Amino acid sequence: MTEPKNRRGLLIILSSPSGAGKSTLARRLRDWDPNLCFSVSATTREPRPGEVDGEHYRFITESEFKGLVTEGEMLEHAHVFGNFYGSPKGPVEEAINRGCDVLFDIDWQGAQQITNSVLGQHTLSIFILPPSIAELRRRLETRAQDDADTIARRMQKSWDEISHWGGYDYVLVNDDLDETEEQLKTILTATRLRRLQQPQLTDHVRALQTEFEELP
Ligand code: ADP
Ligand code: 5GP
């Protein structure tokens, strides 16, 4: 990997039970910072109405998916709701080396794999909780993307996802959307200032030292 010229890109992971609001929040973050890249996952599930291949997901077959895993092309992968999902490695490495932050909408299994990988030190993980289970169901129903069976399956799985909240750097309760968006921006702004994300500081401090030593 080559070093980025300036700030080093972050891997920002958003996880939540389905329906808690992570896609909505991710879209708002990108409206706020258009330089933010989305990691486009590959999946074996069928596209939903309105979903565009290459934009929302790369929709691929199970054998294509397994091939990518075997070739080591996936940063992480998991089996969720009966389908395979994974984050292709190439675009992520390319983006963070350019100093761009990459946003992942992935489940706890993927979050754990990335956090424990060599890229773990450049990762910011955030878990989004719903204000209540009743509200989670209401959001899944009003999103109107899934049939009743799928919603029931997502509700059943939600506790499994929530039970992993303790493994994340930050945990937000997404009650008021505007407030959660502000909290996310605050976290991201602060994390971008971590020493590790600013390799260019070494040169700056060196310049300060030179100037200091030349003081009359
Ligand atoms: P996820 O990506 O976590 O599955 P979505 O972002 O698709 O969830 O959100 C599910 C539904 O809930 C969407 O219709 C979205 O507009 C709505 N929603 C998200 N956050 C809030 C919030 N804080 N208050 C009310 N509705 C919300
Ligand atoms: P959906 O089918 O609703 O788009 O996504 C279902 C679940 O899969 C969500 O919890 C989502 O975060 C997760 N998911 C989507 N893409 C990936 C991925 O690339 N890796 C992992 N581990 N989970 C993913």
Image (cartoon, grey):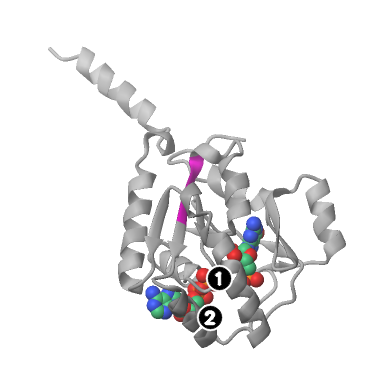
Q: Residue flagged by tag 2: what amino acid is it?
A: Leu
Specify whether residue 112 is painted magenta. no
Residue 140 is tagged as: 2
Quick one: SS at disc 2? helix
Q: Are marks 2 and 1 in contact (CB under 8 Å)?
A: yes
Q: Which residues are magenta?
A: 122-126
Ligand 2 located in image quadrant = bottom right
Residue 113 is tagged as: none
- The answer to which of 72 and 14 lies nearer the viewer is 14
Quarter of the image for residue 184 reads bottom left
Quick one: SS at disc 1? loop
Disc 1 C-beta below 8 A from ligand 1: yes
Q: Residues within 10 Å of mark 1 (few under 14, many from 20)?
A: many
Residue 58 shows in this picture = yes
The residue depicted at 70 percent of the width and 68 percent of the height is 81
Q: Residues within 10 Å of mark 2 (few under 14, many from 20)?
A: many
Q: Overall secondary structure of the magenta stretch? A: strand
- The answer to which of 45 and 155 lies nearer the viewer is 155
Residue 18 is tagged as: 1
Report x, y in % for residue 166: 47, 50
**Up-down relation of residue 180 to residue 144 (above or below):** above
The residue depicted at 44 percent of the width and 64 percent of the height is 129
Report x, y in % for residue 44: 77, 67
The residue depicted at 50 percent of the width and 47 percent of the height is 167
